[in-house]
Image (tube, rainbow, N blue to C red):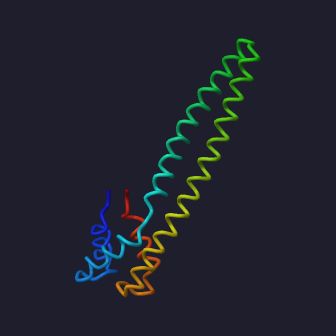
Amino acid sequence: MTTYVEVAQALVAAGYVSDADVDAAASVLGDALVVESAQDAMAEALADEAYQEGLIADAEAMANVDAEMGTYEDEEMDMETVEDAQARVDVDEGVIANAQNWMTAAYRDAAAALLAAELIDEADADAVAAVIADVWVV
């Protein structure tokens, strides 16, 4: 897990925050950088998506076996499993996209908070948000 001080130090290393302002920047980030719930939602959705894709692969393989054996009813059940799993994958992809959008906004908000605290230059706000996005890991 990345700390606010580590993010502030990365901003110093990138030339956006002065050494003297590391503690102040870390404090501002502590108040402004709130992305854990979005990252948790994204992690859960990614895990479920991987699980569902495994189910799809298994069900498609079983459907092929059932088709070869002529067990049509089982093949239909396998295809229903595929359709259900694909629907879950679609939902997971929506959750992932929403979480990514929310995190991008949170990184921009954190950069805006640093700007409001006069710790960064306005011209650097987008670049600062990009550094935060690259460094921040929960």
Q: Is residue 48 left or right of residue 72?
A: left
Residue 121 image point, x, y percent = 40, 87
Locate the N terminus by quadrant: bottom left
Q: Say above or below: 120 vs 26.
A: below
Instruction: Residue 63: name its quadrant.
Output: top right
User: Residue 135 at x, y = what percent?
Assistant: 36, 64
Q: Residue at x 27, y 69 (%)?
A: 5
Task: Say whether residue 66 is left or right of residue 29.
Answer: right
Quarter holding the C terminus is bottom left
Q: Relative to 96, is 10 above or below?
A: below
The front one of 8 and 62 is 8
Q: Residue furthest left?
A: 20
Q: Nearer the viewer, residue 18 or 116?
A: 116
Instruction: Specify whether 67 is left or right of 31.
Output: right
Residue 82: percent from left, percent from top? 67, 32
Residue that extends furthest to the front in the rendered view of this protein = 31
**In the visual, does 114 lie left or right of 96?**
left
Which residue is found at the position 27% from the left and 83% from the top? 18
- What residue is drawn where x is 47% and y is 74%? 109
Picture mark count: 0
**Residue 3: percent from the left, percent from the top?**
30, 63
Whether 133 is drawn above or below 86: the answer is: below
